[in-house]
Image (cartoon, coloured by chain):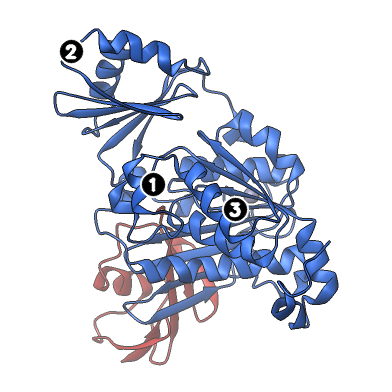
Amino acid sequence: MKITVNGNGLEVQEDIKHIKGLIDFLGLEDKPLIVEHNQQILQKEAHEKAVLESGDKVEIVHFVGGG
Amino acid sequence: MLETNRYQRQILFTPIGETGQEKLSRSHVLIVGTGALGSSSAEALARAGVGHLTLIDRDYVEESNLQRQQLFSEEDMRQKTPKAIAAKQRLSQVNSHIHIDAIVGDAEIDLLRQIAPKVDLIIDATDNFETRLLLNDTAQKYQKPWIYGAVVASYGVTFTVLPDKTPCLQCLAEYIPNNGATCDSVGIIQPVVQKVVSQQVTEALKLLTGNEAALSGKLIAFDLWENQHTEIEVASLRKADCPSCSEKRSYPNLAYDARLKTAVLCGRNTVQLRPQRKKTDLAEVAKELQKNNQIKLFQNPYLLSFEVDSFRVVLFQDGRVLIHGTMDQLEAKTIYHRYLG
Ligand SMILES: [Zn+2]
């Protein structure tokens, strides 16, 4: 299915079923992330319950420290 | 009084105009950190005619800074000039009509407490979250806006924290990475600095000229190399029981720690030690060290530097010491006690 991540289109396999699966797929599982799924901010506990559907918009942001 | 032509193009920009320009000239901005982000925002604000800038930085200019820290020259590097001083020197050439305070030191509790009440806003250009949390609580306490900015590799993040309006950094604490993750071994490209600073300085201009309604209100992140741009509405993350910004506030980040403070400087293979006593007589220390003829000393009016074994030790007037060549805080303490008491 095709979703949008941080403004860019992304084709993901059907076995990626929820936000947590997407985060693992992107290799971001070790970072504390602010995740917005279709304009709704998700708490970490909700990542596994948030089902991905074709056309979904996901924004993922992490803090960095450098200056 | 405004020089007639200097700010003409900015005054022609309607949201600023004569009134906004007048406000800028009466504004005081604190910039914490004068590395990449700090150099760039200081130059932008100086050129824009912000009447009073206070710069704080604990470091001195090194060769690897020149790629992205736009206020510094090779001469600053040769002289090991403290960044705040070198920045002030350059900015005074850029705009001699504004007032600039340069402070060589750590942005610690007492210093921030002296300065924060007098400023209109604070720009975050630090490289660590310990200082940012301190800034956060100071800003909440004195009801000042502050603008978070950070960069690594080709990635940048920024967010404007408004007292009593937006979430503060403490509200977002669960998203702060632990120390190791912020230490960048992945480098940085200069354009991402400019992009974060563009955002920070524009937000600052809006606030200083009374254009609050134009503020972004969002957490903004981008990766220039990956062509990504993201904005997230984070208002819902404001915590009703936040210890820094709610009614039940206790400012946990302003709690004192009296010990010899050590900090690993990210990506620098360097440990900083900050003893409690203030002010060091550099000449006195130099005289002591010269008794050891193994030690080669370098001195400028602001600092003293020497090499010993595989370490380089730099001592500042305010008593701080940088030990280059280690990330091990215990090892750094040993060297400190061996040579500097
Ligand atoms: Zn808060």
Asked if labels 2 and 1 share a chain, the reply is yes
Of residue B124 and residue B36, the one placed in the foreground of this image is B36
Residue B234, quarter of the rendered image? bottom right
Q: From the top left corner, tell me how far across and down residue B235 is, in percent.
A: 64, 65
Chain B shade: blue
The front one of B194 and B89 is B89
Tell me residue B168's x, y (percent): 62, 53
Q: Is residue A35 visible?
A: no
Chain of the residue displaying label 1: B
Residue A40 visible in the shown view = yes
What is the crowding at mark 2: few (fewer than 14 residues within 10 Å), some, or many (at least 20)?
A: few
Q: Quadrant of the N terminus of chain B?
A: bottom right
Chain of residue at mark 2: B
Q: Mark 2 or mark 1: which comes first in sequence? A: 1
In screen coordinates, is B163 left or right of B87? right
Q: Which residue is denoted by mark 3 in the rendering? A: B92
Is B158 drawn above or below residue B302 in the view shown? below
Q: Which residue is mark 2?
A: B293
Identify the residue under disc 1: B76
